[in-house]
Image (spheres, helix red, strand yellow):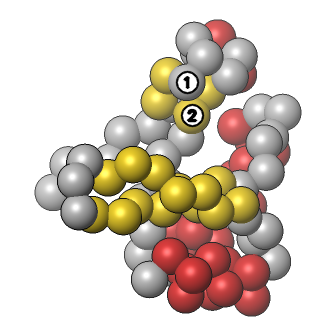
Amino acid sequence: AAVVLRDRLSLLGVSTGMTKVDGNGSNTLYRLQTQTFDSLADAQPTLAKIRGMGITPLLIGNGIIGAATNAPLSQSPVP
């Protein structure tokens, strides 16, 4: 599923890196990560493409908007 998602994002012009993540036991998880952006405004076009696929992106801050390293800048919408 991660490879399919990576390929779909690539078709939209969003390049990603894929890394294997320990999934607590028998599950294998993969993290797809886009390039870094200098600001949230710079990330908006890529975020729009990802959201257009029905995916809620998780933004990890590294100094933008005064966020601490690896602090989420967004939360999943409340259903």
Above or below, 76 against 62 in this view is below
Q: What amino acid is labelled 2 in the image?
A: Ile
At numbered mark 2, what does the secondary structure look like: helix, strand or loop?
strand
Position in image of residue 32 (x %, y %): 59, 60
Position in image of residue 58 (x %, y %): 48, 46
Q: Is residue 66 left or right of residue 71?
A: right
Instruction: State the residue at coordinates (51%, 68%).
Output: 51
Instruction: State the residue at coordinates (63%, 86%).
Output: 8
- Tell whether label 2 touches label 1 (CB within 8 Å): yes
Q: Residues within 10 Å of mark 2 (few under 14, many from 20)?
A: some
Above or below, 50 against 32 in this view is below
Q: Is residue 46 visible?
A: no
Q: Is residue 59 visible?
A: yes
Nearest to the observer: residue 25 or residue 21 = 25
What label does residue 3 carry, if any? none
Above or below, 39 against 50 in this view is above
At numbered mark 1, what does the secondary structure look like: helix, strand or loop?
loop
| Quarter of the figure that contains the C terminus | bottom left
Kindly identify which residue carries mark 2: 60
Nearest to the observer: residue 40 or residue 26 = 26
Kindly identify which residue carries mark 1: 70
Q: Quadrant of residue 70?
A: top right
Sequence-wise, which precedes: disc 1 or disc 2?
Answer: 2
Position in image of residue 34 (x %, y %): 71, 56
Q: Is residue 4 left or right of residue 9?
A: left
Q: Quadrant of residue 1?
A: bottom left
Gap between marks 1 and 2, in whole Å?
5 Å
Q: Residues within 10 Å of mark 1 (few under 14, many from 20)?
A: few
Above or below, 54 against 43 in this view is below
Instruction: State the residue at coordinates (60%, 17%).
Output: 69
Q: What amino acid is labelled 1 in the image?
A: Asn
Q: Is residue 63 left or right of residue 53?
A: right
